[in-house]
Image (cartoon, grey):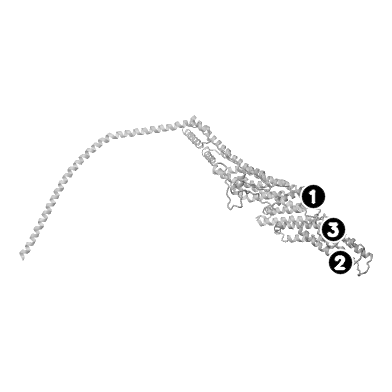
Amino acid sequence: MGITSRMVPTEDASARKREIEEKLKQEQETLSFIRENMEKSDQLTKGMVSILSSFESRLMQLENSIIPVHKQTENLQRLQENVDKTLSCMDHVISYYHVAKDTDRIIREGPTGRLDEYLACIAKIQKAVEYFQDNNPDSPELNTVKARFEKGKELLEAEFRSLLTRYSKPVPPILILDAITVDEELEVQEDVVLEHLPEAVLQDIICIAGWLVEYGRNQDFMNVYFQIRSNQLDRSIKGLKDHFRKNSASSGILYSPAVPTKRKDTPTKKAPKRPGTIRKAQNLLKQYSQHGLDGKKGGSNLTPLEGKDDVLDIEIDSYIHCITAFVKLAQSEYVLLAEIIPEHHQKKTFDSLIQEALDNLMLEGDNIVSAARRAIMRHDYSAVLTIFPILRHLKMNKSEFDTTLQGTAASTKNKLPTLITSMETIGAKALEEFADSIKNDPDKEYNMPKDGTVHELTSNAILFLQQLLDFHETAGAMLASQETSSSASSYTSEFNKRLLSSYICKVLGNLQLNLLSKSKVYEDSALSAIFLHNNYNYILKSLEKSELIQLVTVTQKKAESSYRELIEQQIQMYQRSWLKVTEHLTDRNMPVFQPGTKLKDKERQVIKDKFKGFNDGLEELCKIQKGWAIPDKEQRDFIRQAQRRVVSDAYRAFLQRCANISFTKNPEKYHKYRPEEVEEMIEKLFDTSA
């Protein structure tokens, strides 16, 4: 047991020793291998170092050889560049000395047709000028190129003028009419573009203007621009005016074929709507003021002066259209001007451009006012009717007018308001003097209608007032413009309406007083009553038909009933004329008798006198009153029937009382008319054709 135990550890130690010896031997072999490799590596390193040392030596030799060559080459390149730059500068400088010669032909021939090439030449000359000014200001070449530059600028200005003059044409009247027309059938109005210059020409003009502003240092071209365009604007408006004079019919409608596919054969622009009575009123008023009355049925038989008033209508429509055309053309001119003229000069140039056309329009307006003033001095109040449509149009377009003239001088802006004020003043004066003339019209016997019909003064006054209805806002503003009271400060529409109503009532009141005075000229009170009846009835019916009554009732609520009362009063006054006929048919002085009793001679004579008085009175009244006139059929029939009923009833009652009385051997001598014949005679009253 003990021996065995000791032997086991001894064997393990031997095995361990052998294992360690083997590992040691392997490590020694590895170390030997590493040493061999290290020796080889040292040999290689020594070889590489030797090669690198040799290469470094050769590089140093090469560098010592190349660097001087490189530096020499670099210097040569720098010298070459300097030479090239010098030569280029020389060429550039020399070119300035040849600019005048090189550009001579193009400058002499001008820019027409080759603006871009011409501007390029001008640019070369401009650079030459700048070079000589900076580098050789005393050289003769500077004067040469300066002269050439000025010549070039001069020719550009001439080209600017030439293009504007050659291509600026008046806008055709039919195109203007299409531009200002309002077609009520179209829901959306199409703007008609007014092309003043061809696009290519416009671009050249813009280009020249831009150069003159930037390089030319010249604003003279702006004067040239506004002078040429101002002339064309004025010619366009005058052309429209001539078009009216040549082509307007009496209806005042102009036809424009500019857009035939859309408007077909319908007129593109109609004259402002003015009632047909305006011409009649003008004629009546003129004849009244110039010729007086002819003793006929008032104004009903007057002959209208159609030719003269056609011309007047055309002139009014022409002026109204020219005002609208001016606004449209001026707006179009500003759009064109804004593309050509520098922004800070646009308003001033535009102000100058529109002056001639605007002044001519204002002068024409002043002439209208002056003509109206002279006519009013002659008591021709129809002249104010020409002012109404013009004034209304001016006031309607004033806001657009003001917008168009925005930015112009105060004197320019104030021209239209001044004209409006003048028209309102003269219009208000005419209205007031017309009212006075109605009140003060003389009571001349030869002026009174022989048949008691409507007096010409009445028809004139009503026709005149009807125009105030058609222009009630304008007329009201006219009257308000002369008010100085604090209540008139606001000039509201309602205030103006009340003023106009008061004025109409004033005219009607003056007319009523004058008619009452005129009626006294008649010796026959019945004819006087018929005269007043006809005039009052004419006034009332005219007020109702023209809706003037609505204006009158603004300040006089009972005007209509008042006239009806006046008419009824005159009917009653007329009926009194028949009392001298019917009084013979009453029981007054009628003898009292018993049937079968023989009448005394005196009693028989009373009955004879009654028959004779009735017969003579009836014949006399029918003869006289048959020549009188009641134009209103309704009133004529009413008065006839009322009188026929009164006379016929009285006559029948009288005949019945005398039926059984023997007062004469020749009853047919006194009983001349049957009741039916009396009625027929009365039915023929107021009938000049009977």
From this viewpoint, is residue 444 visible? yes
Q: Residue furthest right?
A: 601
What number is the disc on residue 294? 1
Residue toward you, 500 or 289: 289
Q: Position of residue 305 (x, y in %)?
A: 73, 47
As measured in the structure, the alpha-carbon distance from the residue carrying label 3 to the one carrying label 2 is 24 Å
As measured in the structure, the alpha-carbon distance from the residue carrying label 1 to the one carrying label 2 is 48 Å
What number is the disc on residue 656? 2
Q: Residue furthest left?
A: 3
Amino acid at pointer 3: Leu
* Foreground: disc 1 or disc 2: 2
Residue toward you, 604 or 242: 604
Q: Residue furthest top?
A: 140
The residue carrying pointer 1 sits among few (fewer than 14), some (14 to 19) or many (20 or more) residues within 10 Å by Cα, namely some
Asked which secondary structure carries label 3, the reply is helix
What number is the disc on residue 621? 3
Q: Which badge, 3 or 2, comes first in the chain's sequence?
A: 3
Amino acid at pointer 1: Asp
Residue 63 quadrant: top left
Horizontal side of 29 relative to 324 (left or right) equals left
